[in-house]
Image (spheres, rainbow, N blue to C red):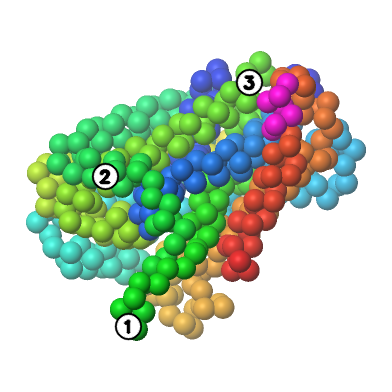
Amino acid sequence: MSEQRSSIHGQWSSRFVFILAAVGSAVGLGNIWKFPYITGENGGGAFVIIYLCCIAAIGAPIMTAEILLGRRGRQSPINTMRALVKDEGAHPAWSLLGWGGVITGFLILSYYSVIAGWALSYVFQTAAGSFTGANAQQVVDLFHGFLASPATLLVWHSLFMVMTMFVVARGVRGGLERAVTLLMPALFLLLLILVAYSMSLGAFGKGLDFLFSPDFGKVFFHCELDAVGTEVCSFSGEPILVALGHAFFTLSLGMGAIMVYGSYMPGNASIARATLAIVIADTAVALLAGMAIFPIVFANGLQPAAGPGLIFQTLPIAFGAMPFGQLFGTLFFVLLVFAAWSSAISIIEPAVAWLVENHGMKRVSASVFVGALAWFLGLGTLLSFNVMSGEEFQLFGKTIFDLVDYLTANILLPLGGFFIALFAGWIMSRASTRDELQMGESFAYRGWRFLVRYVSPTLVVIVFLHAIGVI
């Protein structure tokens, strides 16, 4: 069926370019910002092993399904799901899956642009020497002062959104493809440079040991001293749930980005092989980020379990104190911006594609329209860190940013992934999925079908229940 349809937006020039684009979508702040600190909080090497198992059980099968849907429909997620619902004779309500992905991506872009603006600002602050010789309190005060200024945040939020709109407005070949073929190799090169730099600091072995030496006791058991000084340990499954959640979120599943990128994929390319390459590259970036960050942390006597502040508060202390820290700190934040930029252009693309298809808009107009709406909605996130941070502006004890983040990460994304798995595994006919995957009745096909029908949806439900606090 995908051979009978063609995308009006064009398609990637090769399977390799599609892989670069999908890796660019998947690799974002989560790989370079979140993965290192959750690894630090959950015991290092053993957590990495659990995470890799979760990627195989939940991430790869659902990514394969989402690419499959996109290439078979050859349109924006909204129109793709409409077409596939008709093809498979499914209930019209399944069309809402496309809408859900586009809306989720739009909401994520609104706050993603604000956070990416922080990284963009830190490129210039680090290059200017703002952290050179600064102590911990000075770095924290600088960060808090930065967040307290709506005007400053507005400049960087606006600049990042303009960068995103500029790429998407130029189309699949002239914008998206050209951007990812430059950004992704540059991102890997920067990572390798930072890893090489970390090797020179004297704590590289300690960083590798922390990242790759498994100690499952640290993962599964939480120990503390009781009132009489006796160590008491209790079992905890929390790290497994964290690994499951990150395995799902790191691949940009459930927001329409992978589906729309799949719609531009050449018909003769193997979806299974592309998925494997994407998963390996995404995981490699996360591990390389850990190899770059943890030696820096240990070499400067910092804590690997520093949490979300690891990137914007802890690492600047290290960069400010180490030889050539100004240069390599700047490169690190450039890396962070590249990762965020490649993700943002994939997040905005589904909505832009739909406007072009359904309302006859030019890509430039559609990109500006969607980007401007997301920019405006992002003002709520921006103000959540300063003038609208008080209780009078909160709902259910959450700021606007907290609400949008909670709604997308904990509810909309898991639901999107769950229904993608159900549609590909249960609603689409065996003949349709087999035809699109081009795997015949092989062991690999039967394995994917079993995972996407039974294992992946079950694990996504567990992720969902944990995210909303039920388990």
Q: Toward which corner of the image does residue 352 lie, by quadrant?
A: top right
* Residue 223 can be seen in this image: yes
Relative placement, left or right, of 376 versus 208 is: right
Q: Mark 3: which amino acid? A: Ser
Tag of residue 207: 2
Q: Residues within 10 Å of mark 2 (few under 14, many from 20)?
A: many
For disc 1, the marked residue is: 228
Q: Which quadrant of the figure contains the N terminus?
A: top right
For disc 3, the marked residue is: 270
Q: CA distance from mark 1 to mark 3?
A: 62 Å
Q: CA distance from mark 3 to mark 2?
A: 37 Å
> The residue tagged with tag 1: helix, strand or loop?
loop
> Which mark's residue is nearer the viewer, 3 or 2?
2
Q: Residues within 10 Å of mark 1 (few under 14, many from 20)?
A: few
Q: Mark 2: which amino acid? A: Gly
> Which mark's residue is nearer the viewer, 1 or 2?
1
Residue 68 on image: x %, y % = 69, 31
Residue 321 on image: x %, y % = 11, 52
Residue 211 on image: x %, y % = 34, 44
**Residue pictured at 70% horizontal, 48% vertical:** 457
**Residue pictured at 21% horizontal, 51% vertical:** 298
Say if mark 3 contacts mark 2, CB within 8 Å: no
Say if mark 1 contacts mark 2, CB within 8 Å: no
Count of labels shown? Answer: 3
- Residue 117 versus residue 80 in the image, above or below: below
> Which mark's residue is nearer the viewer, 1 or 3?
1
Magenta residue check for 71: no
**Residue pictured at 54% horizontal, 56% vertical:** 241
Q: Residue furthest right?
A: 89
> The residue tagged with tag 3: helix, strand or loop?
loop
Residue 293 on image: x %, y % = 28, 46
Q: What residue range appears in magenta?
A: 442-448
